[in-house]
Structures are given as C-alpha cells and as structure tokens.
Amino acid sequence: MISLTDLVESLGPGLLRMVENGHGAQVHDVVLAEPGEAAGQPGELVLGVGVTGPADAVALLERADAAGADGVVLKAPLADDPEVIAAARPLRPALVELRPDTSWTHVVWLVRGAIDRAYAPLPDPPGAPGVHNDLYALADTAAEIADAPVTLEDARSRVLAYSGRQDTTDPARVSTIVGRRVPAQVIDHLRASGVFRRLARSSEPVFVPEGPDGMLPRLVIPVRAGGEWLGSIWVVARTPVSGDRVRRLTDLAAVLALHLLRLRAEAGVARRVSADQLRTALRDGTRVAAPAPPWRVVALGGTDEAGDVRQRLDLWDAITQRFGWHRPLLTDVDGTLFAVLTERPPRDDDPGSLPWLRHVLTRVRDHDRTLYAAAGGTAHSHTDLPRSRAEAAELDALVTSGHLTPGLTLLEDAWDAVIVERARKATRTDTGLLGGPLPVLKAHDETHGTAFLPTLAAWLDHYGDPKGTAQALDVHPNTLRYRLRRMAEVTTLDLSSPRLRLALRLQLSALRTPRHRRNE
C-alpha cells in the first residue's frame, strides 16, 4: 500500500507536485477521466486528460469527490488556478499538478510502475529487473549512436548501466564500471572543471577534455525532466562526435529521463514500504526482513536538526548509501529516526552493523559535529525490537537535552543516566513536592535569593565532603558551612538515612536544580 503523498514525492517535482492534500488515504490504481462517467472510485488517482479550463477542472474534482476517488491530476498552470484550488480544498480528492510538457501516456506508465512496486514483494532489489534491463539496452543504443563506449549515471555519479562495448576505454572508465561509481579523483577533476555545475544548470551537451591518469575526453549529455537534472549519458569521445550523433543522443536522453523517473519512483516507493513495515516491527515486535539477530535499534539524529523527519530520513539515507549500506533499515517512529543494525557481523566493516556505524560516525562527524547515534540494548529476536527502540529513544532524549555528549552512545555505557532519568520522570514534581525539607528550602530560595537547593544537591553528590562540595559550588568552605547551618535553622534536615538521601536527590533531579549559584 502507498499513500498519494508518498507516490507524488517518489516521482519527484520534475513530474508531479502536491497542491492540496485532500482527505483520502492510499491509492492502488490510476484511471483516465471519461466524459459523462464516474470519475474514479476509492483508491484511484484520476488523470484530467482533456480538461482545458477552470470550470471543467472544478467539475472533474466534484465528480471525483462524489465517486470517492483519492486524487485528481491536472496539468500546470490549471492546477494552480485560484478557483480550482478553492474548489479542491474541502473535497476528498487531493489536487496534484503535472508538469505541462509531460505526456499523459508517460504519467500512466510511471505511476502504474510505482504503484505496482508498492504491492510487489520487498526482497526484490528496487527497480529490478525490468527498469535495469531497459537501462542496459539504452546504454547499448547510445553506444551504437555514438560509436563509442557509454555509461549511464545518475546525478550522484553512480553507474546505472553501461554499454556492452568497452574496447576503447581508459583506467577511469574501468574503475567506474568495476566500482559502480566514478572514482573520487575523477569526480574531483570534473568538479574543479565545472562539469557538474554545467550539467545541473543546462540541457546542453558538455565536452570534457582529457584528464589525469590517462583519462580520455568525454561527451556528456544531461538527462533532465521538468527542469530537474536526473543523470547523464557519458561517452568516451576518443574522436569528435558529429552534430547529428549528438542530436540523436539528446533525443535518447529524453527517453532515458522517463526510465530514471520510474527507477527513482520505484526505489522511493520500496523505501517507504520498507519503512512502514519496519515501523510496525519497532512498535509491535512483528517480524521484519533483516539479517540474522542479534540487532540493535539505533536512534539517528543531529543536535542542530532542521526540517521535518522526512528530510532527516533523506539525509541519513544518503549517508548510509554513501558508505555502502544500499538497503538501509531506516524508519521514523513518533518523530525520531531509527535504524536496525546487526550487532555482531561476520566482519566489522559489514555495512549495516554496529562497528560499521562507529566508522561512519567518525567520518561524518569530521564535517558535522552535530550528528550522533544512540543505541538501545541488544535485541535477540523481533519481539525485543520495541524494547531496544524505547531504550534508544531514551538515550536520544538525553543527548538532545544536553545530558549526554553527541557521538555514538551505547546503552551499556550510559545506563546510569537512563535510570536516573526514569526515576526523575517518575518523581512527578509537576504535581508538587510530597514532603520533606525541600518545599521549605525551595520557597526560601525563591523568596530570599539563597542557594539552598544547589548546595544540598552538591552536598549529596559529594557524599558530604565539605572540600569537594565547596569546589563544586565555587565557594569558600566557610560559605558552605554557613549555608548548611542556615538550612538547618530553616527546616529539619536529617541526612543520616540512605533512603532519605536518595529521595532528596531524586526530587532535586526532577526539579532540574542548577549545580552552581553564587548569590546568597
């Protein structure tokens, strides 16, 4: 199952854009609007083919609402018409905008492929095998047109397919094909030459001269859809490519754009379906497709987080993909991002393992010190996953509140902080202090500006050691003695009972009593 919002986001802004979210749920098919007939039914997305004006658009929305359809697609600029938007807002169907230069036939193909992927079994790799087979066929076609070796790459310089003929190539091309990614030194050269900047901004072909380590010249054809750069066709241009061949390659790029949109949509849908299943497992302990246990549930975040959870999910998905975890087990639960990692992998560098995450964090925190991970206890079976998730969430809250240092935090290394935090929450000072000396001392501090509460907290933390307590408070020992005498005069303060000392410390923790205060 897939929601219409997820479907639109999977296909991307180069094709579709959500204008009004509507009040529907999930979609399972796409249909064309037929004149004089019901416009769809529950779970269907209706394509407004032939709708030319605001009046027709409003009529289609009302027909779709009456039929219970979940969405209506209209081409721009009609979908942005104020009259159409106002009519759509109270209705059930969502209003979706389609780029004006997109074929309705292509929309049906792409949307049906994405919906089919949402209902397909997850163990298949995203986009396999149909889309990838088509990409290899397109690579061979491009090689025939250019009479030269070709690779098809996405906007992240990942190799999606390559032509069968690679006879006239160079070491950079061999490394690219073997590693399924352009080597770092080649990317640095291309970036310094401004190649990626030109590809991102223009639809014009780019000629790349010879590069380091014997790199042969390249002809690069950008692949774009709706103004969005999706990828490129890379031709080893040992000899100049004629203008006619370049035009034919440009025409082929338009076909390739549809395949890349479909590939991205299917991958996005597969990720969202996987995230839904993983979310259920973390909440209810149901089975989930994952490597063999034991596992760790890990909260992933950043102390300087911005944006919603989807943006954070995209960030960590990009990080995990970059470091080799190509099918990361990531999801969000109640606004927190979680991953399920293997605790004891066959090798420490296996992607998706706890040792691997330690390495990844070391690398990424060199550039962004706000990123961190907090790992709950070991889960030996799927029924342990909710408990491990809850523990990871507790650690995550301690990191974001500043009580734990960002980095990789394991439950066994911070169990004491978790215990204290649980006790602090259970103390419930929001309902009032139950008794003892604290209500009187707290009232005296608030009325007279004294520092009785932080003094008592430091005294308890240092086992009644006057020297350590005075140093912690940054006061003279005589000042400490004076405060203790005054506290005993204000209220009865018997600290001989271990249970009473524990209760007082928990109350002070619940009050978030500051440790240092200079005024008397």
Image: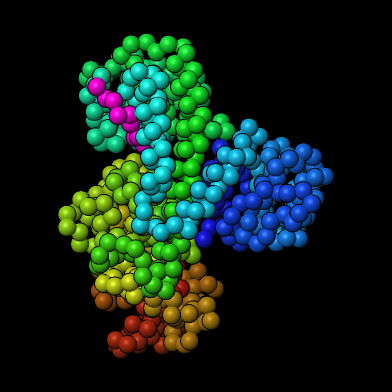
Colour approach in the figure? rainbow
Residue 447: image location, x then y, percent: 54, 73
Q: Residue at x 49, y 65 (%)?
A: 334
The one nearer the camera, 254 or 303, is 254
Q: Residue at x 25, y 57 (%)?
A: 353
- Write down the region rendered in magenta: 159-167
The one nearer the camera, 30 or 285, is 30
Residue 506 in the image: above or below residue 393:
below
Inspect the magenta stretch and tell me whether residue 121 lies in it: no
Quadrant in the rendering for residue 93: bottom right
The one nearer the camera, 516 or 168, is 168
Q: How many marks?
A: 0
Q: Residue at x 49, y 40 (%)?
A: 261
Question: What is the quadrant of the C terminus in the image?
Answer: bottom left
Quadrant in the rendering for residue 500: bottom left
Residue 212: image location, x then y, percent: 25, 18
Residue 43: image location, x then y, percent: 62, 60
* 250 sits left or right of 278 in the view: right
Residue 404 visible in the shown view = no
Residue 298 in the image: above or below residue 310:
below
Residue 241: image location, x then y, percent: 39, 13
Q: Residue at x 61, y 36 (%)?
A: 103
The one nearer the camera, 269 or 345, is 269
